Amino acid sequence: MPAPALDIQKQIDQLELRRAFGTFLTGVTVLTTTDGEGTPRGMTANSFTSVSLDPPLLLVCVGKSAASFPAFAKSACFAVNLLHERQDGVSSLFASKSAAKFESIGHDVVHTGAPVLTDCLTWFDCSVQQRVDAGDHMILIGRVQAFGTSPSPPLGFCRGRYAEVKDPLPPEWSPSRNMIVGYIIEADGRILLRATSEGKWSLPIAAGRQKTTLLDLNNAKTVALLPDATFLYSIFDVSEGDPGYIIYRGRLAASGEAADDLAPGLRFFPIDDLPFDAIGERDIVAMLRRYVHERSQNRFGIYVDAIDGGRVAMISDPIATRSPAAE
Ligand SMILES: Cc1cc2nc3c(=O)[nH]c(=O)nc-3n(C[C@H](O)[C@H](O)[C@H](O)COP(=O)(O)O)c2cc1C
């Protein structure tokens, strides 16, 4: 039986209305922008909606009473960072009035200049397309200039509480498919490679998708990665019937001499002098060449292969500079 209707002749009770709106299950996002001084500003929001594919548009609603409202009302760009299931703490931080929201959260500039969280489920870097005044909120319509996504399960929100999503990944993502999980690991301008039994070099591989930043590479020595600098980079199949590759990029937490304390068979090579001729797999070479090129511009896309030749998940015009601060 449907819930009883409110008598619309009566004044709508705001608390009841808020509760009714709150029964709609959503994800959770952090909206980010910069204020007039260039200081990053951000707030938690679940009012995100995709709007259009062509042109690529989305919207969010920003409360006029939010301390960061003036920044969103003026800035020419903003980013929407969708949170993954382990980021309820990030949501609470950005829903607070803390003056130090960005101090403990890695962020980076990708395209428009809006801060993009280095760890999140999916991000959309947008220029402002339109602002619409709407009661106690402003509808902010953004045009997606760049975006990136990851296979993490999303953080949900319903009735004022965080919610878990049941079966968050489609079957092709399931670990039972045993995709090969490889890592492009950087330290001090170098990339870590692994010697293969055929006397060639390849990327280090891990036993599966790791939830922690401690990586057990080649079942040998454990290395620690910087938690905020680990991203999905590429997904591809090398041949018909192979299990497929998921490649992450990460940064070693250690640097200098400590970085070189490695298990046998692992070695760092300068990023601009990789032994491409000694890497066996053609697709890994192609991917590493793309990585080296993108690293030189500090601007990355996520490659997903497809029947039509694959695509890089980044919509872009010219190159924007990217602050290395968060990496
Ligand atoms: C899950 C969740 C969703 C929220 N969604 C929105 C929203 O869509 N729009 C909004 O203006 N505030 C929303 N808020 C409230 C803001 O995050 C909160 O007002 C915050 O204090 C704003 O930060 P600021 O005052 O520093 O700008 C949400 C809060 C939570 C916890």
Image (tube, rainbow, N blue to C red):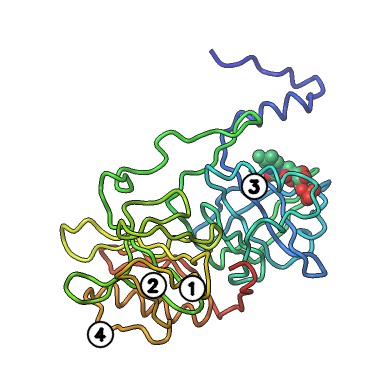
Residue 56 relative to residue 244: left or right: right
**Looking at the picture, how far across and down is residue 239, in whole percent?**
18, 64
In terms of image quadrants, where is residue 321? bottom right
Mark before the other along the chain sequence, 4 or 3: 3
User: How far is disc 2 from disc 4 in space, using C-alphas?
Assistant: 16 Å
Q: Quadrant of ligand 1?
A: top right
Q: Position of residue 32 (x, y in %)?
A: 68, 58
Circles 1, 2 touching at the beta carbon (< 8 Å): yes
Callout 2 amino acid:
Leu
Q: Looking at the image, which residue is at 68% across and 66% down?
A: 77
Q: Nearer the viewer, residue 52 or 104?
A: 104
The crowding category of the residue bearing disc 4, from other C-alpha atoms within 10 Å (few below 14, some 14 to 19, many at least 20), is: few
| Marks 3 and 2 close (CB-CB < 8 Å) | no
Q: Amino acid at mark 1?
A: Ala
Picture quarter with the C terminus: bottom right
Query: 87 or 47: which is nearer to us?
Result: 87
| Foreground label between 1 and 3 | 1
Which dot marks residue 90?
3
Q: Which residue is mark 1?
A: 187
Answer above or below: position of 237 versus 208. below
Q: Which mark is residue 192?
A: 2
Sequence order check: which comes first, mark 2 or mark 4? Answer: 2
Q: CA distance from mark 4 to mark 3?
A: 44 Å
Q: Earlier in the sequence, mark 1 or mark 2?
A: 1
